[in-house]
Image (spheres, rainbow, N blue to C red):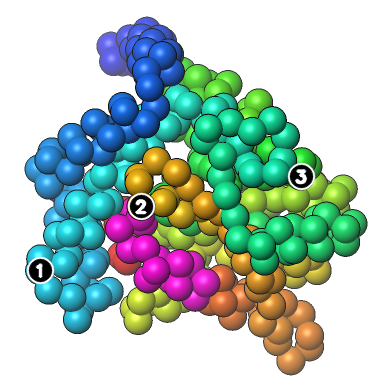
Amino acid sequence: MRGARFKPLLDATLGSLTIGLLGAIKHTDRRRMANFSGALMRKIGPLFKEHRIGREQLRASFPEKSDAEIETILGGVWDNLGRIAIEFAHLDEFSVEGFGPPTPDAITYPPESKERYDWIMNSGRATIGFAAHLANWELPGVGAKLIGAKSAVLFRRPNIGAVSDVIIKLREPLMGQLIPTGLDAPVRLARLLQSGVHVGMLADQHYTKGVEVTFFGRPCLANPLIAMLARQTELPIYGMRVVRKPDGNGFWGEVSDPVEPVRDQSGRVDIKGTMQAITAVIEGWIRQHPEQWLWLHRRWR
């Protein structure tokens, strides 16, 4: 009871600290501070229990890699996480090459992604997008708005209310409409899709009530929401990712080929099969740049 009385005060204090910290980071040079933060996390990251989780999952996923190779990947994971912490305060400084006013932090992309984007925009249909915890996973949502897409993003609120409010206030002007996870989220997302709004979400986390898929040769549970929305709306599914460039501070982005949904004998979208197809795309992305994925999250349980 006593703790419950002080919780609003604690939440408000943490919210104020978050605002202050983000404001302080905002006034620093992004690249220099990200380099420092990435290097710091390479040193202190191995001290956390999540390092062991990451090592276990990497060994199971890449049994052919040596211990030294696994540790090198984990060093990159911590480096990436340190850089994201700084980049979060600078999200408004990014631009997409060829769209709107350019900035020094322009996200580039291959020609085929521009062709897919043009096809999507000219089709007059909304799309269901998925991304993963790769590189800076906030940027696909930011990029969608920068290129002029009318979009909405599903997100999970942080547990601390005041911190959640700060983060939402920062994200909303940059990412389009934010839909919090909850019982009404599937209905809200379906309505947005039917009204022509593109919907995106992360699709690489453990989901207790999910469908079983195979990921790096082992079974795990995936949130079936994307496939459920595809079944309900018959709208196309696309993957969206950003990749951190070798300098650690630049990014290039990609829109995948459409993911063809698997169908059952009656022709309806098969939920499990379609989520397996999406999971296979994400696995392919991670295999290309394993050091940029969040191996610290326990994906297999």
User: In the rendered view of the protein, which quadrant contains the N terminus?
Assistant: top left
Q: Which residue is mark 1?
A: 67
- Residue type marked 2: Pro
Q: Residue at x 71, y 58 (%)?
A: 114
- In the rendered view, tell whether residue 94 sits above or below residue 228: above
Which quarter of the picture shows residue 163?
top left
Which quarter of the picture shows residue 283?
bottom left
* In-front residue for pair 125/217: 125
User: In the rendered view of the protein, which quadrant contains the C terminus?
Assistant: bottom left
Mark closer to the observer (3, 2): 2
- In this rendering, would 121 be left or right of 89? right
- In this rendering, would 159 be left or right of 131? left
Closer to the chain start, of discs 3 and 1, is 1
**Magenta stretch containing residue 293, yes or no?**
yes
Few, some or many residues within 10 Å of mark 1 (<14, 14–19, 20+)? few
**Magenta stretch containing residue 240, yes or no?**
no
Q: Which residue is mark 2?
A: 246
Give how far across and how far down residue 286 sits, in percent.
40, 66
Mark closer to the observer (2, 1): 2
Closer to the chain start, of discs 3 and 2, is 3
- Residue type marked 3: Ala
Q: Which residues are magenta?
A: 280-294
- In the rendered view, tell whether residue 54 sits above or below residue 61: above
Contact, CB < 8 Å: mark 3 with mark 1?
A: no
Q: Which mark is residue 149?
A: 3
